Amino acid sequence: MLLVTGCTLDDANFSQYPGFDAYLSAFPPADEPASERERHLLKAFRPRFYVAADETGPISFYDDYIAEGRLYDAAGELVATDVDRALLNEYRDDPQALFVHEPVSEGGTPVVAARASTSVLRLPGMEAPEAAVFLHYHLVFRHSGIAAGITGWQRAALDLIGDADDWHQLDHYAAVTLALVPEPGVAVDKAGPEELIPFAATMQQHNYMRAYALVGGTVGGDHPGRMVMDANHRIAVDVAEASHALFPHARERRRHRAVRFLDADSAQYLVSGHSRPLISGDDVTDPAREVDYALQFLPPSDAFYTFQGWLGERRRLPGRDSPPGALYNTLPPLQPERVQMSVFFWFEGAADYPRDLAGLELHTWRPPREESLAPFQHRLVRALPCRDDWTLPCARDL
């Protein structure tokens, strides 16, 4: 069946899904990179990433990936075999443009693309909305593979029709977003690292995400939805083998339930382990070394984020086409950061989560109603630690 359905290619990729035009018109990406103050924040709170012993990435998007390949226009005509950032941005808004990566070597320079944004935050129990800072970090890998914890027969079947470790070219969706609020009385646009408190982290896992409530020190580990920061308010993140899904750091090898897409049915499996979907597997994290990386501050409008065409070769099987820009990492209705951190906040034992997810009616392509977001927001607030040095609500305020 896969071979039959894979005989034709879709004319458009994820960037052309209904709703992206409206979202980007309402929230156009800035043409300026992070300011000096934002760069200071991005450096101060940068996550620590751990990869498996045989992982060759991450790499630099422009120096290692785009520098090695060919660019084609909408007519399929070769544009250049020597592609750089300026040329890629010339074709940024063409949904039929195609870049094909042709790796020269497996090595690369670990570079994480970083940007910052500010958005209004509304949570149950808050006296009034307030502004929050969101820090975004994207790792880049030459290719993305299937979850490493699939069965032997599944891997053998996949290898007959493709490469399970190189399912599609480019993985720049290995992303972490941190949400921070200033201490009481401090303006969000003036706050420095010592005056901002991280309270949530959202991590990409395949075609969906997962958010965590952040706590400091070694407290709070009793809640399955919490993640611990170190003394410097930095989080440690493990990169899964092959798939590059992101998970809280653990000292030992671990397996994590994984599905292809997040919906009410697959969410039931993720939160309970029951009703396993046919297309599912386990992500495997086996942290062996910490990644020593540099930050790159690209404008949010750069092709890295907003390229509408394909940033890798097209392959004649469902799911093997390469992605567009890194901005297109979830459905248009779920693009706002405040929506992501609440809708994707789920954990082992959250029995009501699948029902709440079904209530969002994402198939309508419309932004979720505030009343439909309320159950997700309450779930997040109940996991937040109660602190005296911030204005966010916690369980005692509900």
Image (cartoon, grey):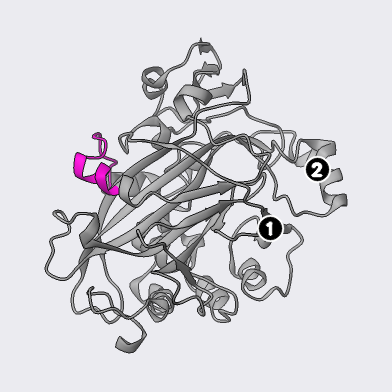
Segment colored magenta: 27-41
* Dot 1: element: loop
Q: Position of residue 156 (x, y in %)?
A: 86, 44
Q: Can you say which quadrant of the picture contains the C terminus? A: bottom left
Q: Quadrant location of residue 33?
A: top left
Distance, label 2 to label 1, CA atoms, is: 24 Å
Q: Residue 167 location in percent, x, y? A: 69, 38
Residue 170 picture location, percent across and down: 57, 34
Above or below — where is 91 with respect to 255? above
Check disc 2 and report the residue beneath it. Answer: 158
Residue kind at label 1, given as amino acid type: Arg
Q: Earlier in the sequence, mark 2 or mark 1?
A: 2
- Point 61% across, 69% down: residue: 267
In-image side of 70 versus 138 (left or right) = right
Q: Nearer the viewer, residue 232 or 133?
A: 232
Task: Estimate how packed mark 1 is, as few (under 14), some (14 to 19) or many (20 or more) residues with alpha carbons within 10 Å.
Answer: few
As drawn, 299 above or below 347: above
**Neighbour class for label 2 at 10 Å: few (<14), some, many (≥20)?**
some
Q: Main secondary structure of the magenta part?
A: loop
Decide: marks 2, 1 in contact (CB < 8 A)? Answer: no
Task: Give the number of the mark in front: 2 or 1.
Answer: 1
Q: Quadrant of the N terminus?
A: top right
Is 215 displayed left or right of 186 in the figure? right
Picture disc at residue 310 = none
Q: Is residue 298 magenta?
A: no
Q: Label 2 is placed on what type of residue? A: Leu
Decide: is 53 above or below 191. above
Q: Is residue 272 above or below residue 113?
A: below
Left or right placement of residue 154 versus residue 267 in this view: right
Which element carries disc 2, helix, strand or loop? helix
Q: Can you identify the residue that label 1 sits on?
A: 253
